[in-house]
Image (cartoon, rainbow, N blue to C red):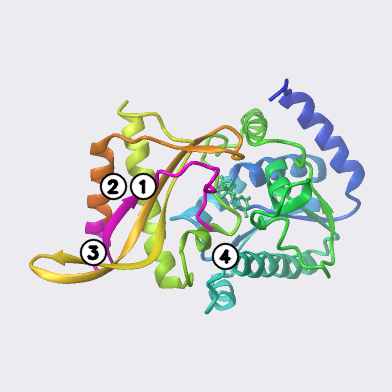
Amino acid sequence: MGFFDPTGFAQEAVTAIEKQVQGRAIIAASGGVDSMAVAVLASQALGEQLLAVHVDTGYMRQDESTAVGRMLVDMKVNHHVVDASDRFYAALEGVTDPELKRTRIGELFIRVFEEEARGFDAKWLVQGTIAPDWIESGGGLRDTIKSHHNVGGLPEDMEMELCEPLRELYKDEVRALAEHLGVAVAQRQPFPGPGLAVRVMGEATRERTALVRQACYIVEQELEAAAEAGEMELPWQYFAVLLPVRTVGVQGDVRAYGHTIAVRAVQSYDAMTAQASAMPWGVQQRISRRITNELKEDINRVVYDVTDKPPGTIEWE
Ligand code: XMP
């Protein structure tokens, strides 16, 4: 990364948004560092002319939507939290293909926004797209690896103009910007636009998503506690994935035939490449025991993903 000046960037971005966006605007506030940073910038530029909409897709992390709502209140951003989870689960019914999942979620996401936008009479959609999102979606000379939710999923008949103030930034620059803006999630790990849906291999039903949500929560809690205790450094990103693989195990002295959770933790600089993180054995054991204990009706095996990017990607889908 070259020299990045968050103060200068923020001032220029606010001026640019004021100039570009004429009339009311709506913004996707997922709660991630990208969307929260851009929500604050847009709110500074547009005030009450901006409505930040947080859509609870049903694929959010544990208690995430409540926390996002609270954060927007704290930052005095005009906002609305919409629970659209039933619609998202319905849109993904029977869908197992990763690209189809991403497209369906991206489309519905924009549809929900359009409904909110009509209610608010917004003509503009502000988004927190950053450089790796569009580069990896085939925006540069590269092949399409996966359609990132905020790029590939845009329906062609979208009714709003698009404003993407963070398009040229890489992740570390966005973090510096968020820190400068006082965004509480500035150091929070990244989370994919399509959410937990791309961490459920196969159909992302309400029930299967609940399993991966709890497993992700355990991984986060255990790693954050281990880092706090000085046992290890916090990896750049860490989460769980539900595999469509059933294996034989034993529960008490009864045969079990349960599902498998994969744990992934990576080190990265800008998400373009990543290395699988080493983790102390004791931490791995605690994670494995908690997952197989707290989810014992469904999960009887935990494996650890040691693949770098490339050849893997960070998320499994
Ligand atoms: P991959 O899996 O492509 O992920 O190596 C690189 C980084 O991007 C996150 N990710 C996404 N972020 N929309 C986003 O805003 C998406 O559709 C998306 N898919 C993956 C991923 O968690 C990792 O940090």
The image shows residue 168 at horizontal and vertical percentages of 77, 38
Q: Label 1, label 2: how many angstroms apart (C-alpha)?
A: 6 Å
Q: Quadrant of residue 258?
A: bottom left
The number of numbered discs placed on residues in the rendered structure image is 4
Q: Is residue 166 magenta?
A: no
Write the start and end of the magenta stretch as one range. Answer: 292-317
CB contact under 8 Å: marks 1 and 2: yes
Q: Label 3, label 4: how many angstroms apart (C-alpha)?
A: 27 Å
The disc labelled 2 sits on which kind of residue?
Answer: Ile
Q: Label 3, label 1: how many angstroms apart (C-alpha)?
A: 16 Å
Q: Secondary structure at mark 3?
A: loop
CB contact under 8 Å: marks 4 and 2: no
Residue at image mark 1 = 219
Q: Secondary structure at mark 1?
A: helix
Residue at image mark 3 = 296
Residue at image mark 4 = 98
Give the residue drawn at x 79%, y 42%.
Answer: 165
The disc labelled 1 sits on which kind of residue?
Answer: Val
The residue carrying mark 4 has its beta carbon less than 8 Å from ligand 1: no
Q: Quadrant of the C terminus?
A: bottom right
Mark 3 crowd level (few <14, some 14–19, many ≥20, 10 Å Cα): some
Q: Secondary structure at mark 2?
A: helix
